[in-house]
Amino acid sequence: MEFSDRTDAGRQLAARLDHLKGQDVVVLGLPRGGVPVAAEVADALDAPLDICLVRKLGVPQQPELAMGALGEGGVRVLNDQVLRETGVGERDLAAVEEREHVELEQRTQRYRGSRPPVPLDGRTVVVVDDGLATGATALAACRVVRAKGAARIVLAVPVAPRGWTARLGGEADETVSVSEPDFFYAIGQFYRDFSQTPDEEVLDCLARGRAARGPVVRNTDVRIPATGATLAGRLAVPDGATGIVLFAHGSGSSRHSPRNRAVADVLNRAGLGTLLFDLLTEAEATDRARVFDTPLLAGRLASATDWLAGRPEGGELPLGYFGASTGAAAALWAAADPASGVAAVVSRGGRPDLAGEHLAGVRAPTLLVVGGRDALVLDLNRRAQALLRCENRLTVVPGATHLFEEPGALEEVAELATDWFAEWFERQ
């Protein structure tokens, strides 16, 4: 007996996923039994919790034995070996599929209602169930998640039979389990309490997850017109937002930057909107001269600012810039424009020196955040700070290197940025 119940299983599983802390992670539980397990994982990783709706296709005379699965978006997975061994014909299979499709639609309405699912595009998605037996349901879940744009899929279960990863056919990028026993008959044999999870518990887990994550956030994929290009982006605006922060990513990065997305998630939870967008098109991003063309990048940021100010979401709200690495130079360059109405700027491990003489023209209060072990960039920031004429502060995160990959470092950056923007937005 490995686990007292699903909550205990979730806590033990979360301990195996600690390496994902600080990344741009979404945790998806498979209803119903996987949701209370996933809730513990989401809580430990401080990640949003949602569901991945998949229905097992059970053998008619052995409903616990999966001969396949259905998932959102029309995903269908069949286990040919089980079908052969049980002799299930096409007519019986079709009847089961029809019944489970109806149940899938009903559960979608029951669990989600009118709420949109958490966006998965470009993110690391942890798919969680209370255990894995045949793998059909997990396989369908991975395919659903991949179809929704996940950049990386981690399939995590408390218990699975030895050699279980071979059943997934490479659909998951990483697999994690607490226990892989040699003698495996059914998932329930490893739980003291494996009673059925009621719908009320699923809804309660999701509600608690939403409450822990802050206000409802409206996410919109957008296309931003700029000089010589149309730029792809993701606009996220919480209900009752008090301001919106535009992100300027560093060289070699994009709107999918896991570090910027992690910071944006913290800002969203604090009631601040975010716009993550590509400063360059895919074709332009291969040109190293453009990647380091600060005037071009600053101009693109200014275009995005004008575009956002003209939208209903941004027209009445104060706007801020969050620049990372070389993107910080673009943010400061754009903020120095006398026509810029930007209310605050934050630089993470930035290269403000690349903004040159424009530093003296910045009027927006500016926070420079640098890792204590990023000696070269720290020196460049100290020199740049001396050129700023605006309200400014240089904060050093002890022990952090340039990318803030150390445990807790990026979280500290996010908290500093949140406090800075909240303070100066409030003064507008």
Image (cartoon, grey):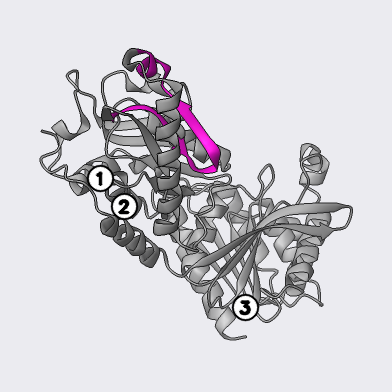
Residue pointed to by mark 2: 39
- Screen quadrant of the C terminus: bottom right
- Residue 52 shows in the view: no
Query: Which residue is at the front of the view, 257 or 238?
Result: 238
Vertically, is 396 above or below 366? Answer: above
Q: Start and end of the magenta stretch?
A: 64-84
**Closer to the observer: label 2 or label 3?**
2
* Residue drawn at the location 37% of the way across and 20% of the way down: 88
Indicate left or right for 344 with 79 as reference.
Answer: right
Q: Residue at x 31, y 29 (%)?
A: 60
Q: Residues within 10 Å of mark 1 (few under 14, many from 20)?
A: many
Name the residue that disc number 1 marks. Answer: 10
Residue 404 in the image: x percent, y percent?
49, 49
- Residue type (three-letter) at the residue carrying disc 3: Glu
Q: CA distance from mark 3 to mark 1?
A: 46 Å
**Location of mark 3 (residue):** 391
Q: Left or right: where does residue 232 sit relative to residue 154?
A: right
Mark 2 element type? helix
Q: Disc 2 and disc 1: Cα gap in Å?
A: 7 Å
Q: Amino acid at mark 2?
A: Ala
Q: Residue furthest right?
A: 228
Q: Position of residue 395 (x, y in %)?
A: 51, 64
Whether the residues at callouts 3 and 1 have beta carbons within 8 Å, the answer is no
| Sooner in the amino-acid sequence: mark 2 or mark 3 | 2
Dot 3 crowding, Cα within 10 Å, few <14, some 14–19, many 20+: few
